[in-house]
Image (tube, coloured by chain):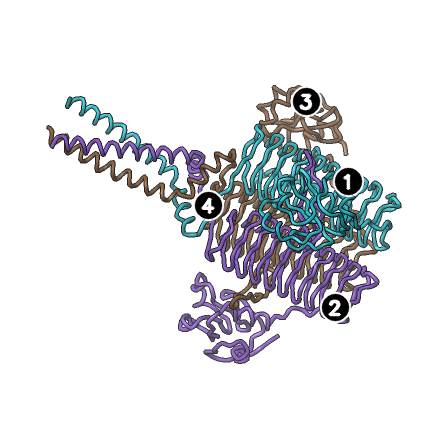
Chain colours: A cyan, B brown, C purple
Amino acid sequence: MSATLRELAADFDCELYGADTVVTRVSTLAAAGGDAVTFLANPLYKAQLAKTQAAAVILEERYRADCPTACLVSARPYLTYARIAANLHPPAAPVPGVHPTAAIAADVRVPASAHIAAHASVGSGCSFGESVVIGAGSVLGSNVTIGSGTRLAARVTVLDRVRIGARCVLHPGVVIGADGFGFAQDGAAWVKVPQLGSVAIGDDVEIGANTTIDRGTIEDTVIEDGVKLDNLVQIAHNARIGAHTVMAAMSGVAGSTKIGKRCMIGGGVVMIHQLDICDDVMFTFRSVVTRSIDVPGTYSGSLPAEEASQWRRNAARFKNLDALAHRLRAVERTLKNLARSTRNKEEDDD
Amino acid sequence: MSATLRELAADFDCELYGADTVVTRVSTLAAAGGDAVTFLANPLYKAQLAKTQAAAVILEERYRADCPTACLVSARPYLTYARIAANLHPPAAPVPGVHPTAAIAADVRVPASAHIAAHASVGSGCSFGESVVIGAGSVLGSNVTIGSGTRLAARVTVLDRVRIGARCVLHPGVVIGADGFGFAQDGAAWVKVPQLGSVAIGDDVEIGANTTIDRGTIEDTVIEDGVKLDNLVQIAHNARIGAHTVMAAMSGVAGSTKIGKRCMIGGGVVMIHQLDICDDVMFTFRSVVTRSIDVPGTYSGSLPAEEASQWRRNAARFKNLDALAHRLRAVERTLKNLARSTRNKEEDDD
Amino acid sequence: MSATLRELAADFDCELYGADTVVTRVSTLAAAGGDAVTFLANPLYKAQLAKTQAAAVILEERYRADCPTACLVSARPYLTYARIAANLHPPAAPVPGVHPTAAIAADVRVPASAHIAAHASVGSGCSFGESVVIGAGSVLGSNVTIGSGTRLAARVTVLDRVRIGARCVLHPGVVIGADGFGFAQDGAAWVKVPQLGSVAIGDDVEIGANTTIDRGTIEDTVIEDGVKLDNLVQIAHNARIGAHTVMAAMSGVAGSTKIGKRCMIGGGVVMIHQLDICDDVMFTFRSVVTRSIDVPGTYSGSLPAEEASQWRRNAARFKNLDALAHRLRAVERTLKNLARSTRNKEEDDD
């Protein structure tokens, strides 16, 4: 696709300063040429602005004077960039049709607008909205519902009775609806607790590569509208992830924990089971969440790596931290007694 | 399936109190209707007991008086629930047969009771017990052995010479028998150490979605009977997981570490290589295990997340914990000297 | 394969002491019989040397006197072992040919030496070097380039425009080139930032089972020559992993972080975004890396698990570590004042 800067300014609600020209693609500040539009959103990259060869830079008003080329001034340059990038680089429209190697149960009606790729397997009772894409090697169990415009990339697994909304993207290796991890102890052994619920996923959800979302034990595991999950994320049975919450890679939620709306969960964060996390909570990377949270805000829980010998010394002290605190308490007491006796002595002396 | 409460009481060794009726399903305390049986195992949910509409509640004797409906009294209500749920909701029996798109090596004998689904691929020399299920898109290398009643869900990979026992369940995306991570350093570069062992998995093992178990370097990686692994678990080459040990999601075991029987490994726990963990050890979520354990019991190793500014203050102090301990030592010495000199002074004064 | 010890000594640059014989395989010190060669590299296993029944042991000169059988003396026994093992147990050469169930775009030229297995799917514009192996159920998008001798095990996904060098090994479940996790905030909702870059992977790279490497936002994510990634590793968009760096299982790198050459990243290590890690850095298992590193060396960041009640006491103190440090400061001040007043008093007394 191509567009003039003037068209982009009009379509994406920003103001053009400088000469109009035709652009055909987006690029970085450093690599952009005269056919490309770029952006400045992170101040870290401000030094690159002066030397950019881009046709135009999307930026905030405050950076306009520093821009050597045309600019598209926006209050939210990263958001404007996202929209312009999608406009100049629209995703390839799926070619409607069913690949001859796909194995589709006889009772399934495939919309003419849908794309079902090679070696996909679709079970009985599945139902598809318009323009769904079922990528190569994906496997759908029985009675799966997939909303219009949703795209399963290659090798996605969606098991029986899972419901997925519209305009979702599921990346390769995703597994939705495997059994939750539920066992009842019988002496030394474990007896499987049937996992009878399913998974309900809202609209506009994106799920990263090799992420797993288990089905509920009795009721459903729920992923609300607009949730974005990164790669290798684990969502256990009966968890609920509130609308527009984002979870970065390698984070995980144990059984029955409910996360509110608009939360931001950093990479590698884990939450234990049966917690309630309110709306608008941020956990920074690698936090371990062990209690419910009812106050919005930012929570942290990881210690940064240090040079190894320094770390070892501090870690060794941590092993004796309780003893150290007791020693401090003893010192405080001794000192108090000493101060008192000194004071008494002075009074005696007076 | 359906059953009378009287039949359930007789079959699952519990005592019926209240009116007999027919039930057809299990449900939760909150959602159950008059056709459903439910359970009370976690005291957290006790408040819901008073309002339940269930036909009957499986519970301990001590809660019987609080139950507004019929109840099935059991010493172990969760275990009894698991068995009744499996009775009312038996897993769909696999339809025997081989899908025409499955690619099966010519020398493989498939039992008439087995189900091999679409786009499965089975290598030469594989051998199957009765009623095995090979899910859609699963790939078996050569000379894989799978015991009777074992079910590979969709898209499972089992590589050459792996042996899997009877009645196992492998969830989608599981990879068994990929090469262990073994390289020998040659200057800056790494030379691959051939991974010549395989993986031996016992009976009644369940393995969660996208979990990986590597083959051994020379001898086998071993998963003993009754082990349950959750999603996204990593088992490195030559590890051994003892019978009936459970490992929650995102936990991992490095090379050659041996875990005893009946251990419980929390979510996100990692163990370094070449450890020996004795039987009956529990590690709570996110522990880092760096030494062998020969005393059964519970071990912990994670710090819970706190409000961010509070966390930051404490984390900053941790960086200087060794210095802080030295300062405390200095204080103790000064104080001792001071006390001595004060004592001496007093003696002098006397 | 088989070889005499004399041949092995000549071919792999080590010195034979003791009787020559024919060996056909490698084994462990404990299990080896008279047809096997084994090695001693880790001093942990030295006790097993005295009882070995191996035909020969690969070991350092200093252990030669303790070896009851023939030995192959090498300065680097593990490296020599790796090479001899590969010699005696060469990987099965792939049988050239395309399985009839593979779905290959019409414009793709498959070299006669290549092996494309059952249910593989290859998109338009893909290009293959000699002797590539595309395992069963693997999916390649469009315009993927794969260098000669590279082997994709079963069920690997490689998406559009990814370039992979020569002699790489990608284990099952690997996903290369899924969209990076990029969203721009628009009020409560998130707008997808198109992920327009790709992934460039060098030569001699090995990638473990279910590992994910995302495509770049504008430019490419880069994995340099000789990198080795273990299972369940996450590489985010625009990361760069320097040549010969190794990353153990469950480690992860956030967006735009650059890791130098010859680094060693322990299991479960996570690095936040936009860091620069210099060459020759080692992070021990489970470290959290939050700042750039420009000094080669070893860095650590995890606390080892302890017996639970002991851990709980120390963890409770950590929550008040800042307060404890303030208390120590107060003690130091009081003590200083007290010492001064005692000194003054003594001077007064004099």
In the picture of the structure, the residue carrying the numbered disc 3 is B52
Disc 4 secondary structure class? loop
Q: Badge 4, how many Cα within 10 Å: few under 14, some, many 20+?
A: many
Q: Nearer the viewer's eye, disc 3 or disc 1?
A: 1
Q: Amino acid at mark 4?
A: Leu
Q: Amino acid at mark 3?
A: Thr
Q: Nearer the viewer's eye, disc 1 or disc 2?
A: 1
Q: Position of residue C179 (x, y in %)?
A: 70, 49
Label 2–label 4 contact, CB within 8 A? no
User: CA–CA distance between discs 4 and 1?
Assistant: 55 Å
In the picture of the structure, the residue carrying the numbered disc 1 is A10
User: CA–CA distance between discs 3 and 1?
Assistant: 59 Å
Q: Nearer the viewer's eye, disc 4 or disc 3?
A: 4
User: CA–CA distance between discs 3 and 2?
Assistant: 64 Å
Whether residue B306 is situated above or below residue C143 in the rendered picture: above
In the picture of the structure, the residue carrying the numbered disc 4 is C303
Q: Badge 2, how many Cα within 10 Å: few under 14, some, many 20+?
A: many
User: CA–CA distance between discs 1 and 2?
Assistant: 52 Å
Disc 1 secondary structure class? helix
User: CA–CA distance between discs 2 and 4?
Assistant: 48 Å
Q: Position of residue C24 (x, y in %)?
A: 58, 73
User: Which of C20/C306 is in front?
Assistant: C306
Relative side of A44 to C16, left or right: right
Residue B183 visible, this orientation: yes
Q: Amino acid at mark 2?
A: Ala
